[in-house]
Image (spheres, rainbow, N blue to C red):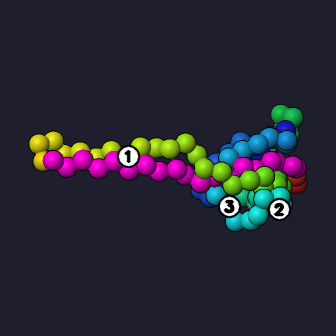
Amino acid sequence: MYAIVDIAGKQFKVEKDQYIYAPKMEGEAGSAVKLDKVLLIDNGGKVEVGAPVLANANVSGKILEHVKGDKVIVFKKKRRKGYAVKNGHRQQYTKLLIDNISGK
């Protein structure tokens, strides 16, 4: 059984007891989270698709920790002008453990 959920505008395929790295969410480590925007549920070959979301479906999980992603280097340069700027960025993520997927 799996579900496709929308978390902060990004879609994730989740299964029970799976870890995912979602965009940073509100909440402390160890707190429970309920994801209501379920777009699709597949229960042993029986697929339910929402229009756009399923009404009585939700996915529950637990926030494990807040982490940072890998560093991305942003380098800008204009040739022959003496202009060069180097910046770095680390995106913040929330590590979630999916506990339960409940459908209709």
Q: Secondary structure at mark 1?
A: strand
What range of the chain is rendered magenta? 82-101
Q: Residue at x 29, y 50 (%)?
A: 85
Residue drawn where x is 34% and y is 48% of the image: 86
90 or 101, which is in the foreground? 90
> Residue shown at 68%/61% (left/top)?
25
Q: Which residue is mark 3?
A: 25
Disc on res. 7 = none
Q: Amino acid at mark 2?
A: Ser
Q: Secondary structure at mark 2?
A: loop
Residue 98 among those drawn in magenta = yes
Which residue is nearer to you in this view: 28 or 34? 28
Q: Residues within 10 Å of mark 1 (few under 14, many from 20)?
A: few
Where does residue 5 sit, x and y in percent of width and height?
Answer: 71, 51
Say whether residue 82 is visible: yes
The structure residue drawn at horizontal position 46% and vertical position 44%, both measured from the top left corner, is: 72
- Position of 93 compared to 75: left or right? right
Q: Residues within 10 Å of mark 2 (few under 14, many from 20)?
A: few
Amino acid type at circle 1 is Val
Q: Is residue 90 left or right of residue 19?
A: left
* Residue at the outermost left position: 80
Compare marks 2 and 3 and give the one earlier in the sequence: 3
Magenta stretch encompasses residue 90 = yes
Q: Earlier in the sequence, mark 3 or mark 1?
A: 3
Q: Label for residue 31?
A: 2
Q: Which mark is residue 74?
A: 1
Q: Residue furthest top?
A: 45
Pick whichever of labels 2 and 1 is earlier in the sequence: 2
